[in-house]
Structure formats: C-alpha cells, structure tokens
Amino acid sequence: MSQLIAPPRRLFLSRSSQITLSAAAVGLLAGSGAAHAQSSTSMAADVGILNVALGLEHEAINAYQLGAMSGLLQKAVLDVAVAFQSHHKAHRDALIATIQKMGGMPVAEKKMDDYAKALNAGALKNQADVLMLATRLELGATNAYLGVIPAFRDNKLGQVAARLAADETMHYTALMGALGQSLPNGALSFGA
C-alpha cells in the first residue's frame, strides 16, 4: 500500500475537464500581460499569495497520498482520491509555472513525514476519518481561494483563484456526499 498514486497518463488525459482547467489556468496565470506591467511591489504581493496557494496544493496532494497509503479506502473511494489528487497536481503545476513566470521562487514541498505529522495521519482509523480530513482540507482551500481574490493586483489571477475555488468546492461536495452528510443549507456558505 505504499505505492504512490500515479494514474496512467491515458486516464489523466481522458479527463478533459482537468486538461481544460490546467491549460486555462496556465494561460490565465502565466500568460497574463498585465502581470508583467505591474510594479515589482504588486507583483511580489501576488507571488506571495500564489505561494500560499501552492502550499495548500502541496498539502492536498500529500493528504490524498496519505489516505491512499493508509489502506483504509475502498476501491471506488480510492479512485476518487486519485482523481482529486490529479486535480491538485494540475493546480500545483499551474501555480509553479505562474510564480516562475512572474520571477518568483515557488515554495518547496515538504517531506511526507512533515505532512503526516501536521495532518495527524496516525489518527486515521477508517475510511470516514480519511474522508473527513479531506473534506476539512477542501473546505479550507475553497475558503482560502475565495478569500484572496480581492487581494490580487492582477484581476486575471483573481479569476483563476475563483476557478480553483470551484474545483475545491466540487471536491468538498463530493466528499460530503461520500460521508452521507448534508450540504450547507444556506446560500453564500463559502468564502465567509
């Protein structure tokens, strides 16, 4: 069970929505002409925000890895975890490309043991525990992405943050369903 989650390239390429998001994210993030025209202070602020987002993506990738390695997930749930992890890898790659294009240094991924400790992986005893951890992280990422949109100096970066938040919300919704839990009852539940 210590095998890494690495869906075959064909499986990844067959998921056109992932390809579309990744290509669009790279295009909007890395190709934004407005980003090049920003002052160095504004650009540095945007790079800082993007690095926080990159840190969240590193954490999500490793959280799904920990869940897969736990041996606690049923096959169908493991397949969903693989798909969600691939989304986070696409997010990571787009963020790294953008940070580098803007002249920044992407924040490094930590060691798996660091994530295991920070996420209290030792407390995961069953599939529900793994799903609850993933749900908490996806909700946190949703709210973080929505919360930083107004802080971006480049509006196109805010647009991409909104698209990333949509992915995180989709993950959260699917995980809540897998747990048999109700979705929020009220409107405007995210980003508050």
Image: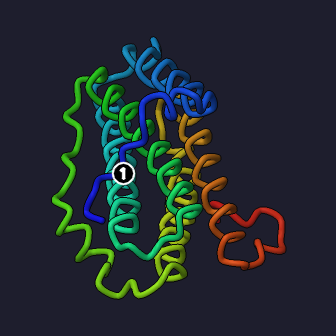
Q: Nearer the viewer, residue 128 or 171?
A: 128
- Tell me if 171 is positioned left or right of 39 in this view: right
Q: Nearer the viewer, residue 144 or 35?
A: 144
Q: Position of residue 146 (x, y in %)?
A: 58, 52
Locate residue 178: give its quadrant.
bottom right
**Residue drawn where x is 55% and y is 23% of the image:** 24
Q: Position of residue 132 (x, y in %)?
A: 53, 77
The mark total stands at 1
- Examine the rendered structure and indicate whether residue 190 appears above or below residue 30: below
Amino acid bearing label 1: Ile
- Examine the rendered structure and indicate whether residue 110 appears above or below residue 149: below
Locate residue 160: give its quadrant.
top right
**Residue drawn where x is 34% and y is 39% of the image:** 45
- Tell me if 52 is positioned left or right of 73 in this view: left
**Residue drawn where x is 30% and y is 23% of the image:** 102
The chosen color scheme is rainbow
- The quarter in which the N terminus is drawn is bottom left
Circle 1: element type: loop
- The quarter in which the C terminus is drawn is bottom right
* Crowd tier of the residue under label 1, counting other residues whose Cα lies within 10 Å: few below 14, some 14–19, many 20 or above: many
- Tell me if 143 is positioned left or right of 70 in this view: right
Q: Position of residue 180 (x, y in %)?
A: 72, 78
Residue matched to label 1: 5
- Examine the rendered structure and indicate whether residue 30 appears above or below residue 67: above
Q: Position of residue 115 (x, y in %)?
A: 25, 67
